Image: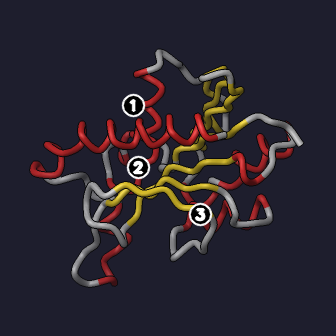
Amino acid sequence: MSDKLIIAGLGNPGDKYNKTRHNIGFDVLDYFLEKNQITLKEEKKFASTEINILNKRIIFIKPLEFMNLSGGAVSHFKSKNGIDIDNILILHDEIDFVFSKCKMKIGGGAAGHNGLKSIIEKIGGNEFHRLRIGVGKPIDNSFVPDYVLNKFSSDEIKLIPEIYQTCYLKIMDWIKLK
């Protein structure tokens, strides 16, 4: 197996979804890339780049298909590079966490998250690493799809820089440990 790493941020493509709760994986990845002066090359189904950070070879990916198809891009790079499932980190929104809570996790189910479902199905396992980024949840679970596709409130926007920095540090710690 390859010693390369994959870090993928999840979201939906298009301006309509910019700065929505469901796209916080994209946003955190963008922050990390900008802070390290890294740019992605866009292709039809994904944007990606491969670079060295802390002497580790890392492939950064933003799937550019809708959330429920995110697994295609991750699977493509995993297979193409012979990357072990344990060397994959997925950045995604987490409705089961209060807004701003960020936590690393290895494995687990999809818990209704269509991006995670797609990745688990396409790569044939769930033992990848995840950075779960809390976006809170609506009082009534029947409104989850609308809730995650809404933009952040003005109070939430004030906390975004702190969330991005916390996530940045967690990603760097993950890279160091690999």
> Which residue position is annotated with label 3?
116
For label 1, the crowd category at 10 Å Cα-Cα, with few meaning under 14, some 14 to 19 and many 20 or more, is: some
Q: Secondary structure at mark 2?
A: helix
**What amino acid type should be assigned to the residue bearing mark 2?**
Asn
Task: Say which quarter of the image contains residue 79.
Answer: top right
Residue 27 lies, with reference to residue 144, above or below; the image says: above
Q: Residue type at mark 3: give it.
A: Leu
Q: Disc 1 versus disc 3: distance between alpha carbons?
A: 21 Å
At x 10% / y 51%, what residue is drawn?
Answer: 155
- Picture quadrant of residue 82: top right
Q: Badge 1 is on which residue?
A: 31
For the point 34% across and 42% down, the residue is 166
Spatial distance from mark 2 to mark 3, Cα to Cα?
13 Å
Q: State the residue at coordinates (49%, 53%).
A: 131
Q: Which mark is residue 23?
A: 2
Q: Earlier in the sequence, mark 2 or mark 3?
A: 2
* Neighbours of disc 3 within 10 Å: few (<14), some (14-19), many (20+): many
Q: Is residue 159 left or right of residue 113?
A: left
Nearer the viewer's eye, disc 2 or disc 1? Answer: 1
